[in-house]
Amino acid sequence: MEKTFLMVKPDGVQRGLIGEIVSRFEKKGFKLVAAKLMTVSRELAEAHYAEHREKPFFEELVGFITSGPVFAMIWEGENVISVARQMMGKTNPADAAPGTIRGDYGVSVGMNIIHGSDSPESAEREIGLWFQEQDQIAYDKTIDRWIY
Ligand code: ABT
Ligand code: MG
């Protein structure tokens, strides 16, 4: 089953949106596999955003993601990587449809509340970056037979 890395960014944590965001993915039918509230080191932030290292907004990005605690998660389910991205909405909340997380709660591209892996390759890379193998909990949910 597919897994993705999702993170409530510092703005989402400060605004009290952890529960709301977790609830959306739970209700959708995805399974939470790992989660932790944590502060982000500069080293981890730079590794996470390595693809943006040359971009003009890189410093701002690293500063933002290290500015307060984040809530890091691994979620599992059929097509969870692309479906979670759809549930998050477009990167710029101004373009994100109502009903998506960014569309409902975000205003600016710099503080867009949530991160989600954008491909199977980035999901694998980010899960390895943010979590240890033993952090992942394998368990069955009896409700799954009504979801799949
Ligand atoms: P992330 O989940 O943060 O990776 O966002 P997403 O994948 O939707 O968008 P990308 B393209 O990966 O943007 C990464 C972060 O960079 C910010 N950004 C992006 C800017 O501030 N200015 C820009 O012009 C662009 C293209 C938005 C994303 N995160 N934040 N916060
Ligand atoms: Mg991205």
Image (tube, helix red, strand yellow):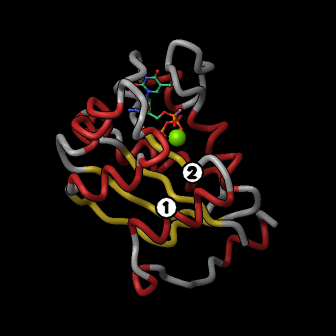
Q: Tell me if 45 is positioned left or right of 117 in this view.
A: left
In percent of width and height, residue 88 lies at 56, 36
* Residue assigned mark 2: 117
On the image, which quarter does residue 111 sit in?
top left
Q: Tell me if 52 is positioned left or right of 11 in this view.
A: right
Q: Tell me if 75 is positioned left or right of 2 in this view.
A: left
Q: Amino acid at mark 2?
A: Ser
The yes-or-no answer for disc 2 within 8 Å of ligand 2 is yes
Mark 2 Cα shell of 10 Å, populated few (<14), some (14-19), many (≥20):
many
Q: Is residue 118 above or below residue 100?
A: below
SS for tag 1?
helix
Q: Nearer the viewer, residue 55 or 71?
A: 55
In percent of width and height, residue 120 lies at 68, 59
In this view, the residue farthest toward the front is 54
The yes-or-no answer for disc 1 within 8 Å of ligand 2 is no
Q: Which image quarter is the N terminus in?
A: bottom right
* Residue assigned mark 1: 126
Q: Amino acid at mark 1?
A: Glu
Q: Is residue 91 above or below residue 62?
A: above
Q: Is residue 140 above or below residue 145?
A: below
SS for tag 2?
loop
